[in-house]
Amino acid sequence: MKPLLEKKLDQTNAVIYCRVSSIAQTKRGDGINSQRTRCLEFAGYKNYEVAEVFSDNLSGSLVKRPGMQAMLAYLRKHRANPHVVLIDDISRLARSVKAHMELRVAIAMAGGVLESPSHEFVDDADGEMTELIKATVSQHQMRKNAEQTVNRMRARLLNGYWVYSTPPRGYRFQKTPNEGNILVRDEPLASIVTEALEGYASGRFETQAEVKRFLEAQPLYPKDLPNGEIRNQRIKDLLTQHAYAGYIQAPKWDVPLREARHEALISFATYHKIQERLKGTAKAAARKDINIDFPLRGFVLCGDCNKPLTACWSKGKNQRYAYYLCHNRECESHRKSIPRDKIESEFETLLEQLQPTENLYRIVRTMFRDAWDQRLTHAAALATSVKREAAKLEKQIEQLLDRIVDAASPTVVTAYEKRIAKLEKEKLLMAENLSSCGKPQRPFEEMFEHAMNYLANPRRLWCAPELEYKRAVLKLTFADRLAYCRKSGFRTPKTTMPFKALAMIQGSENEMAHRGRFELPTPRFVV
């Protein structure tokens, strides 16, 4: 180090270097300005003329900082007229011995001379030792502060609080007098996130790509990219975030899954379904060419070759025309277009034919009421069974804890800990099921209304302008894709179980409702 120590200069030119650890410190405090003021005062005392002031808001353990690099470039440019480099304190130069030594060398090689109002840089053995001791103390303080910060964050996590600087999408921080910053719902983002998560858990969104497109279609949901798209990793993070279920964990800090203090956006059971779906068999990515212009694309099959129909716009002399067509070269209907209005009009007629009669509606309501009452009775018995299973789980956990105490092998202890963690998750899921077992989320009348509003008239939802509603109609109504013949129209469809059950109840002697004959109150979700 001694050969790199600079000799005393007679010139009076100087630059100032200031540093704080983060951007947040530049907003919450006045550290940069305080350092600048102290160095300017010292420069006036030494009769130095300050040419430039450089600053950084990065950790002192880093060597490559924009402000530092700019200062070194300035010193090299003015090497013929060397400058004094003023720092408020050794800790402002660096917070580690390694970084301190590297920067000392870089400043010396660039022709600068370090000075500080709080430390005298002396070119002898004692001065070198004092400087290194101060650099070591600075490094120790940095590491100690980091350890204390982690310990405080871990303790707050153990108490059920979110400790990270950025809240999950759908939440915001709210300062409270006794608990500090806690997560609260951030509407309307919270409702959008809930719909996305529950939609994926229920199968409404079959793939992560569909969740991505749903969120991208929400004007109020923040986007990652300038073109309005969201990164795929954001969707994965959203689907695997424990906080949305009202739980938190931090494996790297040895904080197991535990109940959080903030309000959940979804149930733990829903979160569990999402994780099971993520681990399950991968689904084919949803087609990007399915849009509001052609909602039946990919779902309707050619009646001649049983291949999916594609769709396109055709440009006429004065306007454009929309068509569905078969792309199979071996099919006799290859490239023979079907007007979009014709096929979609026939599809709406098909939906109208599924509408039940008023008499059937009354019969179904009575059947649903009986089934509802039976379900409530069964739920009460199920709650008792769940309590017994929860007691068994608790006993298993206690037994495994006793075995850990007696175990001598680290491998065995690790195996026991993994088993306990799994049982704890099962226990949490069971506790949540027990809290809602036998307690319907909504009364029978409301649940029946929502279900029958759709079954009574699926065409109403199909006529909604949103593409996702149209795709939902296809999933909820038909058990398989529809075959369409250019000459005879749609073939007999395979409907889902609710519509199949209605048809079985109605029987061959009852008629399907005619248009306008029977109408339920407008469902609340239709816009």
Image (tube, rainbow, N blue to C red):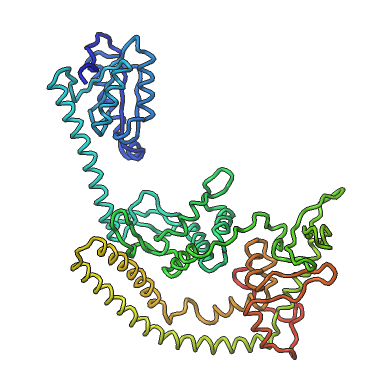
Q: Place residue 141 in its image quadrant.
A: top left
Residue at 23 percent of width and 20 percent of height = 115
**Viewer-closest of 219 and 72:** 72
| Residue 370 to residue 157: above or below | below
- Image quadrant in which the C terminus is located: bottom right
- Does residue 354 lie above or below 274 as drawn? below
Q: Position of residue 495 (x, y in %)?
A: 67, 76
Q: Position of residue 21 (x, y in %)?
A: 31, 37
Write the residue at 57% across / 86% down.
368
Q: Which residue: 20% across, 38% down?
A: 140
User: Total number of numbered labels?
Assistant: 0
Q: Quadrant of residue 8?
A: top left
Vertical placement of residue 45 versus 317, above or below: above
Out of 489 and 43, give the one closest to the viewer: 489
Looking at the image, which residue sits at the far right?
317
* Image quarter in which the N terminus is found: top left
Residue placed most toward the observer, 62 or 52? 62
Q: Does residue 316 appear to the left or right of 271 in the view shown?
A: right
Q: Is residue 121 left or right of residue 397?
A: left
Q: Position of residue 351 (x, y in %)?
A: 72, 74
